[in-house]
Amino acid sequence: MNKKKSKQKSKSKITAQTTLKGKLEVTRSGMGYVIIENVTGDVLVRPGDFTTALNGDTVRVKVIKENVRTGKKEGKITEVVTRKQTEFIGHIQLSTNYAFFIPDTDKPMPDLFIPLTDLNGAKNKDRVVVRLVKWDKEDKKPVGTVISVMLPEDENDAAMKELLAQAGFPLFFPDDVLEESQRFPEMLDAEEIRKRRDCRELLTFTIDPVDAKDFDDALSIRKLANGHYEIGVHIADVSYYVLPETELDAEAYKRATSVYLPDRVNPMLPERISNELCSLRPHEDKFTFSAIFQMTNKGEVKQYWLGKTVIHSDHRYAYEEVQEIIESKKGMHVEEILLLNDIAQRLRKNRFSKGAINFSSQEVRFKLDEKGKPIGVMVKESKEAHQLIEEFMLLANRTVAENVAKLNINKKPLPFPYRVHDQPDPEKLGPFMVFARKHGHVFNTSSPEKIAHSFNAMLQEAKGKPEQHVLEQLGIRTMAKAIYTSENIGHYGLAFEHYCHFTSPIRRYPDVLVHRELQSIIENKPLVDKKMEEKCKHSSERERAAMECERAGNKYKQVEFLKEHLGETFEGVVSGVASFGFWVETVAHKCEGLVGIISLSDYDDFRVIEGDYSLVGRRSGRTFRMGDRVWIRVVAANLEKRQLDYEWVMDAGKEEEEEVKSQKSKVKNKR
């Protein structure tokens, strides 16, 4: 596999009077710093020089002075390029003739003036969601409008909305976007149907989570006269409805991704598009963009076709239903599902043999009451039903990317949103290899492919052993993060030379870009998008924000769940260590909390051994190492900080043993 490291751009220097674009970060004290990509040194901005910029905004800043001795720079913001956040949560302060909105934030920002005509039923001291609608440079106060009043009892709803708003994801769609989404007819256009490959007579079905509403992929299968199988991967044709330079497209690009929180989806597209027109619901004709493969029963692709289609889904399966069919070998369309599963497992085995890294994945899901309060936590693992869908989606994504990569325009690659994953970071890999060697796992670093094979050998050998969890977690941390970029360096983790995202356009904007580019190539009019790299960077940034938001949502629910279990004891696994304590993840519900070093002071004086990922007692030698099984008691659950505090619990037998060790240590010290 031809791999190369992505190019690191050299850092440039800022000179006085230069105007540059960057991201404003406001500290709690009110000072601001503009972070400028590929430039050495941030630019300090004092509160009076923000103009109309807020925390997280992309701005233009003019450097007004520079300290020659220290190199520190100060600047003044001249323009807000894009706002990170336009919707805020806070309280209304109402007077006779005017109202103000006081935002709930630890980052200083001005109150918003709310015209009395825009209160939307809000009363004094109500908690509300407000949208910033106007803030001219000459205005001292920004102007907002109330878009939602939050009820006091809906604490969970407020918490989830706050996470989304702070991450810069709009909570509501603007009226013009909703209006545009309503214009499309329910019935498919007959003329458009004639332009497409008609797949409505093929056996077709979807496989999704039981609570899903946006079905963006379907599979079809039929046996051919030559003994091969025709397998279609059909993807919702979002690009048919969401056209460039429309309000729908601008809003989808701004969001760039759907966000999946424990109790809701904050969608990239309005429900009219995502859950109705584009969702591949059973017993309905739908427009799709398809990758259709002619394959043997051993998973060999003999030929493929890419293009626009129309399909009719015969059945909607939940993953659990398909898993039951695979295990029992009974059920609707059992023969086809077992065949697809067999091919998927062959594709999977082939991927790993070529160097794809086989990290196992677990998903935490919450059982919620009618108010969104967690009353149970479930840990779900990837099973064959999930892998069936995963492998065919990977095949389609890879095939599309390989198809596009062949094309050059004026001897240059066509700008295209590849999904890439760089090789492991040597600085992170080195210490991990030392740790892995302690557990008997030796890495071959002679090539990127050999490193990948070493990872897989380690994961296979560690399966079921006590160190499995820690080796997986630390191994993942050595990996680079996958991003979108027009610089095609391949996908290391999947062992694909060419890869893109084609299969989820309802929830990911890069997939919409891929559909447009692919269709332009099919029509022999390749689209050269000069802003492709900018769009890739934006999509990667929004993806990271969504992932952080989803983690914060899960953490909130975990804290909320264990808040009802204060004082109770659970078994856990040490998931991280630091000089101030160690983190433990409970085995039963994957809730992570901190055992502070102060709470351990009665037992010993502990110090961190970084290379060993452990805390070690100076006197007793007691060790808390990543991956160790321990017992903890829940002592605090802070919802506001999304933080759990545990204390280590020693079982009776160990307690007596420790007491003997302690007494011996005291006698030795006296001598």
Image (cartoon, rainbow, N blue to C red):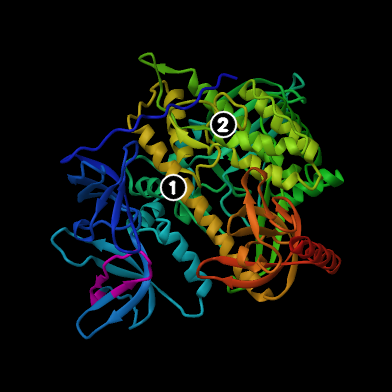
Q: In the rendered image, which quarter contains the C terminus? A: bottom right
Q: Is residue 44 left or right of residue 346?
A: left
Q: Is residue 638 left or right of residue 297?
A: left
Task: Find numbered disc 1 in the image and state the secondary structure of the residue it sits on.
Answer: helix
| Residue type pointed to by label 2 | Pro
Q: Is residue 133 visible?
A: yes
Residue 382's place in the image compared with 634, above or below, is above
Does 661 appear above or below 438? below
In the image, the segment drawn in magenta is 101-117
CB contact under 8 Å: marks 1 and 2: no
The residue labelled by disc 1 is 542
Choose top left, top right, bottom left or bottom right for residue 556: bottom right
Give the class, few, some or many, for how many residues have Cα within 10 Å of label 1's Cα (few <14, many ≥20): many
Q: Is residue 102 magenta?
A: yes
Tell me the kind of residue under disc 1.
Answer: Arg
Q: Which residue is mark 2?
A: 426
Asked if the stretch drawn in magenta spans residue 581, the answer is no
When asked about the image quadrant of residue 176, the answer is: bottom left
Answer few, some or many: residues within 10 Å of disc 2's Cα (few below 14, many 20 plus, some between 14 and 19): few
Residue at image point 49% right, 51% down: 546
Apparent side of residue 23 relative to residue 5 in the rendered image (left or right): left
114 displayed left or right of 332: left
Q: Residue at x 80, y 36 (%)?
A: 461
